[in-house]
Amino acid sequence: MKFEKYVHKGNQFLKELAEELGDPQDKDRAGRVLRAVLHALRKRLTPEEFLDLLAQLPMCVKAIAVDGWRIHESPDKSIKHVDDLVRAVIEEDRRTAAKDFGSEEQAKEAIKAVLRVIKRHVSDGEIKDIEAELPEQLKRFIEEA
């Protein structure tokens, strides 16, 4: 097993995200934000599509994404708008949401930061597949990130 390699790639991903979030020294916050966004996305996407997304991400990021997941659950179609996604992300972050996101507008920017980093690690085709599963407003939000 190449655990050191996995840890290194995971740390690189978190460092990249921390920089994108505007605080390169705070990888802990980056990890919490990443976890909240991934968990909200997994609620909305089909399990198959979420697994396709994860296949292209570093192993440590995959571990964060699947932690506590009940894969048999159906996608939450009530997440239709950007505000719904923002609320889902804030709910996932729970206790540290006020510190990690501040306002809903700051949460939107943090979600976009996560999406930008994911887009750098995932093929355009996979991003298009994800967008195809989402309502128009969420699709545009991902495109604009």
Image: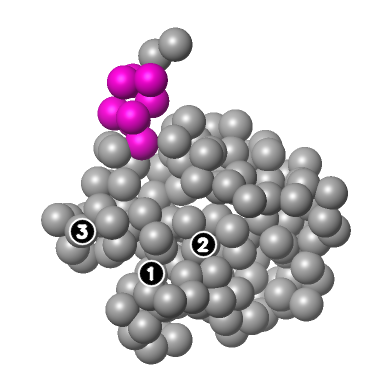
Can you identify the residue that label 2 sits on? 37
Q: CA distance from mark 3 to mark 1?
A: 13 Å
Q: In terms of secondary structure, what is the magenta stretch mainly?
A: helix
State the image coordinates of residue 2 (x, y, percent, origin top left): 39, 14
Q: Amino acid at mark 3?
A: Asp
Mark 2 falls on what kind of element?
Answer: helix
**Would you place residue 105 above or below residue 37 in this image?**
below
The quarter in which the C terminus is drawn is bottom left
Q: How many numbered circles are shown? A: 3
Q: Which residue is mark 1?
A: 110
> Residue under circle 3?
26
Magenta range is 3-10
Q: Earlier in the sequence, mark 3 or mark 2?
A: 3
- Find the residue positioned furthest to the left: 25
Q: Is residue 41 magenta?
A: no
Asked if 94 appears above or below 119 in the picture, the reply is: below
x%, y% of residue 114?
42, 58
Asked whether the beta carbons under mark 1 and mark 2 sit within 8 Å of each other, the answer is yes
Quarter of the image where the N terminus is located: top left
Q: CA distance from mark 1 to mark 2?
A: 9 Å
The colour scheme used to paint the residues is: one colour
**Residue 71's disc number:** none
